[in-house]
Amino acid sequence: MNQPIVHSQPIKSTTINSAKSKYLRRALPFYLMIIPGLLYFLIFRYGPMFGLFIAFKKYSPFKGVWDSPWVGLDHFTRLFSETEFLVLLKNTLALNVLDTLIAFPFPILIAILLNEVGRKYIKSTMQTILYAPHFLSWVVIVGITMLLFRSQDGGINVILDSLGLGKLNLMTDSSYFRGVWLFHNIWQGAGWGAIIYLASIASIDPALYEAATVDGASRVRQIWHITLPSLKTVILIMFILRLGNFIDVGFEHIYLLQNPLNLQVSDVFETYVYRQGLVQGDFSYATAIGLFKSVVGFIMVVSANTIAKRFGEEGVY
Amino acid sequence: MKRFLQTAALSVLALSLVAGCSSNNGGNTQNVTTAPSTNATTAPTADETKNEKKIPITFAVQYWSGPKWAEDHPTIQYLNEKFNIDLTLQIINGPEYNEKLKVMAASGTLPDFYRVDAPTFLAWQSEGAFVELTDWMPKYENLNREYPLDHTAMRVLNPDGELYGLPEISWIVRDTVQIRKDWLDNLGIPVPTDDEFTIDKFYEIAKAFATQDPDGNGQNDTIGFSGGYTVDNLSIRNAFGIANEWIEKDGQLVPHQTQVEEYKQFLTFMNKAYNEGVLDQDFVLRTSTELSDLRKANKLGLYTYHNNYTIDVEKAVKENFPDSNPEVVIMAPPVGPNGDRGNTSVAFGMNKQVINAKADDEKIDRIMQILDWWVTEEGTQIMKNGVEDVHYNKNADGTWTVTDRWEAEMPRFMNSNLFKRPGTDFNFYLWTDEAEIQRNVDYKARAEQYPWNNAAMGLEYYSETYIAKSADLNTKFQEAIYKIIVGDQPIDYIEQASADWLANGGAKIVEEINAAAKK
């Protein structure tokens, strides 16, 4: 390894060749390091895409992927003509708009506020408390909410009732559904999401702040003119990535919160795929819906990225 | 304050339970004392000339509650030796069972012998997933005797002259209304006779249970009645004349979704119950496990249930609340305003036990041998009671004593959850006394006194629209029912829901079912 690279080259090689091979020698370990990640994506992300073509077949597990008959675009026609399609689209988009508008800024806010906390031990304690919920699964979070807010015997409802304030039908009244979902998302995700912003803030040149202080800028002014502009690129990248999931809401959380009384606002593509694909066993139709979702997500990311670039920002690629 | 502390403590406890369960999942909760079962006096004598080759066989079994079988469970060892097989049990949680099967089908890992429900049976049977058994049956005389080819349950869902799975032949009516008599006594209400037990009386009792502290613990923490509108309250629906799926009117089969007038009466009743706090305020959210917990926790004393109430309810309440004196009485279903009353009949023959078509002749033969033995007196006794000297002992005076391992290893598991001899005696054991047997016989007679039959039983699955759309249509219809009960929508909204059901495919289903009935 420590041998001088130039000496090992055949004498006839030109300087360019030698530079190239010098580069290869130096870069080889890095390429080797990429391999596991590359294999992961090829095997577990690109490989399964092969199965997407059952979206155009009437797949039967017993006939197998090859022998199942082709049906063309039947599954897509069915999806778009289903009375439920518009409801699903509306619910999915409503939840995502809410999440993007309200939940998305929270990690930024937390990162900035934490950054302003002077004492280190308070800062790290706060940070730990804020990101701990990330490690709780949805089952536990929804379970706690149920225990606290069940109408008959939920803890908080029992207290509210004994104080004569009446009960809060949080789980069964459909008008609370979106609020509960959003609150869960913020509570569980905001602290964790703040980590990436905290890291970017840490890389800001302290000289900028010092100069601003000398010029008499207040803390708020410093945040507005230094911290936020420095975070702009990261925020934009996170936003573009967020748009890629604009038609996804995550199955588990919604499914756990869902009941017949809030179905009109809680039924989304994921739960529909679950009912059709697993409960009814219609794999082809479920795949078609998945493909439709991926195409929408792809378009969202590409267009958001193009717009970002047009405005002179970096984008994700 | 005391109440608050209790609730808080309960919440914390429940949380710690969640944590406890997740760490326990993979583990095996049995404390098996290592007694090699090969020493047992009942060690089977394998017919070596017959089953020369040892073959691996996989069974899938639905799991609901209790201890799980270990891989080396004495009964598995017994079967392995007797039939020269290597038996693997795939124990699948009950609520996830059907989904798991579909995933297994897609990945080509279905077990050799398993149970499927009616929709899955029909969908897969036409695709050649199961072994056709007509020619196999006559070779196994015990099985052929207990499961005759011309039995209705054998015929239903199968194409003419073909047989793709063995049905469950058991209860006609399994559940009936049950009341905590000790609660009635506490409140000074006499147990109503069949004639007195009207739907209004039901309401009066439920209201008293919800508001007058029937368990006498000084707290207003009991529930009148609970369950979704289908889970626990079918007998109430029946009292208002709503069909068990289908009813015959003027020679036509009519689905319950179109019985708008009956539904209006039923929904008025349920809506009132909900508003007055007689119906559990969380009935929409309750799972069957939670309902079971409510009964055991002395919070629910009026419900529909099967005949395990002595163990599941009386015994559990007594254990949790030593001061109480739980006594459950079996009631007739309540009688409605038009004299209708009934306990919903079980749709028999809908679940089928099937053999995977991938099995070769030798494996099919081995599985059929097991089933043929299973339905004999000897086989049934072992599949219910377990292995002698391991799970129970025979005393000198001819009586029987169970060992510690009987409850811990649950030898009845496969007999209760996979396959059994036809009949309702599956919970009679060698040591079950006469009184208990009599109680079961009485229970059966009482539950079956007022059957509420489905006029189109089994026909539903000949309607293509029903198979493709019924699940989604019913979800919509149920959503409407729930909304009316909790008052989000007026009673008349049922007209809309019924019309929607018909318009979105229901009318086609009615047409197809009536066509199938004429065949």
Image (cartoon, rainbow, N blue to C red):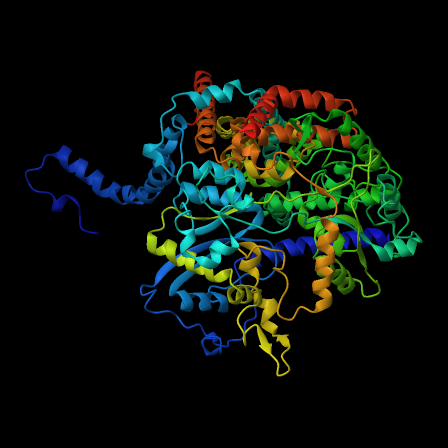
Left or right placement of residue B273 versus residue A18 in this view: right
Residue at x 34%, y 56% (from the top left corner):
B362
Is residue A313 visible to the viewer in this orientation of the structure?
no
Is residue B24 visible to the viewer in this orientation of the structure?
yes
Given the current orientation, which residue lies at the most extreme top position? Answer: A310
Left or right placement of residue A171 versus residue B139 in this view: right
Q: How many marks?
A: 0
Closest to the observer, B191 or B207: B191
Left or right placement of residue A172 versus residue A14 in this view: right
Given the current orientation, which residue lies at the most extreme right position? Answer: B188
Q: Position of residue A276 (x, y in %)?
A: 52, 32
Residue at x 64%, y 50% (from the top left corner):
B171
Given the current orientation, which residue lies at the most extreme bottom position? Answer: B396
Residue at x 55%, y 45% (from the top left corner):
B153
Residue at x 65%, y 56% (from the top left corner):
B17
Q: Position of residue B42 (x, y in %)?
A: 49, 75
Q: Is residue B410 above or below residue B245?
A: below
Q: Position of residue B235 (x, y in %)?
A: 75, 41
Left or right placement of residue A67 versus residue A275 in this view: left
Q: Position of residue A161 (x, y in %)?
A: 85, 41
Closest to the observer, B10 or B517: B517
Q: Quadrant of residue B196?
A: top right
Q: Quadrant of residue B454?
A: top right
Closest to the observer, A88 or B313: B313
